[in-house]
Amino acid sequence: MVNPEVQRLVADMKSGKIRALSRAISWVESQTKESSELLEKVYACAKAPWVIGITGVGGAGKSSLVPHIAKYFANQGRRVAVLAVDPSSPITGGALLGDRIRDNGGQQHPHIFFRSVASRGGQGGLATCVSDLTRVVSTAGFDVVLIETVGAGQSELAILNVAHTIMLIHAPGLGDDIQAQKAGVMEIADVLVVNKADKPGAQDAVLMLQQALLLSEKNAHMHEGLNLTTNHPAHWHPPVVSTIAIEGKGIEQTCQQLQAHFAYLQLDEGYEKRNHAHVMKRMHDYIKQLVLDRLAHQIQTPSVQIRMEKELTSLTHDPLGTARELADSFFQSQATHSEFSQLLRQTSQKETAP
Ligand SMILES: Nc1nc2c(ncn2[C@@H]2O[C@H](COP(=O)(O)OP(=O)(O)OP(=O)(O)O)[C@@H](O)[C@H]2O)c(=O)[nH]1
Ligand SMILES: [Mg+2]
């Protein structure tokens, strides 16, 4: 039976009621019992919005740039949702960015929605539900989503699972971190920004990034499964732009590059391919979560607990052996659902493949 509360919430979101949107986000974040039905409706009616991931080391100026970028697109008539993932200071960090997005008079731009998202449950400082949240805000008519992630080195790569366009922010004075960035994040960046161009060393940082890009350009394209030697119609060469966020300088150039990347994604179905990869990743995450939850539920019965303890204390089993036996017996008991079991086997084979 369709839950009338869910139906009302979706209808209210579609008619632009911001309180309904905030409520829907809270449901999805805390996985309330209604959230599953809500997501079913959301995915059925909402297109994947253009998601721009903003990443880079701490203090580079991500939160200072995001409001300018949001306003640029909003002033073009687009509706922009900003999701800030900030585990270091979930209250103050989010509030700070929220304040910056408001105009001097304290008014929120009518086409900008801001929400701070807790990073729990996610890898790489990115809550797993962020992917679902992009569809939730799309239901409410937001067609551009900016996600500020926490600068966390390698784990920043998680933004690939959600974003179509990835913007990497760097700033002079953070030179040591560029080594870490080269190792992985450089390869996934679509637009690179050297912020704090008012500071000494900014021009050197631009040159350093351009050199690093030349080295990693081949890899940068490989993550999309493209091969430079094939007949792909065009290749994206990540540009490096300079900004001074505190003075609002370089914003237009940055946003034009973001739009150029969006246009590039329309070639050769690049945008659709990323959408497809995003929903597949989300489904794999859900499978893992569901299997783990069900397995944990089975294991937590008193008889199983006693058996496990006996085996482990009598030293007849090691922890891995006991865990394997339990998992095997659970999946055998599910053997009647052969299609499901086959799907799970394929999934685990895929994930354990080197
Ligand atoms: N001189 C100068 N300072 C800037 C500029 N942009 C940002 N800042 C300052 O740099 C500091 C960090 O900026 P944030 O925008 O909070 O940086 P962030 O990347 O969001 O930092 P985390 O969220 O902690 O990772 C703040 O004190 C800003 O005022 C700039 O263009 N020039
Ligand atoms: Mg920040």
Image (cartoon, rainbow, N blue to C red):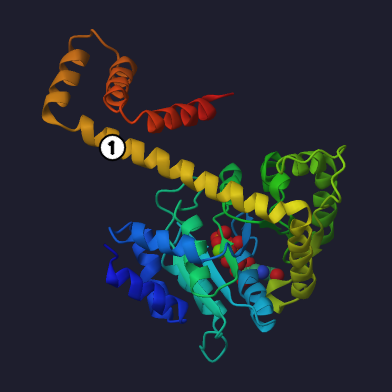
Height in image: 216 above or below 64?
above
Q: Locate ligand 1 by image quadrant.
A: bottom right
Which quadrant does the C terminus fall into? top right
Residue at the spot 53% in from the left edge and 69% down from the top edge: 138
Residue marked by disc 1: 294
Please count the marks in the image.
1
Residue 23 lies in quadrant: bottom left
Q: Is residue 178 visible?
A: no
Which quadrant does the N terminus fall into? bottom left
Report x, y in % for residue 288: 41, 38
Residue 280 lies in quadrant: top right
Q: Is residue 82 visible?
A: yes
Q: Tell me which amino acid carries mark 1.
A: Arg
Give SS at disc 1. helix
Q: Quick check: 246 left or right of 291?
A: right
Q: Quick check: 135 left or right of 256?
A: left
Height in image: 34 above or below 186?
below
Q: Quick check: 227 left or right of 121?
A: right
Q: Nearer the viewer, residue 128 or 171?
A: 128
Looking at the image, the residue that sits furthest to the bottom is 105
Height in image: 344 above or below 241?
above
Q: Nearer the viewer, residue 174 or 317?
A: 317
Residue at the spot 56% in from the left edge and 64% down from the top edge: 47
Report x, y in % for residue 166: 67, 56
Residue at the spot 81% in from the left edge and 47% down from the top edge: 213
Q: Nearer the viewer, residue 51 or 121?
A: 51
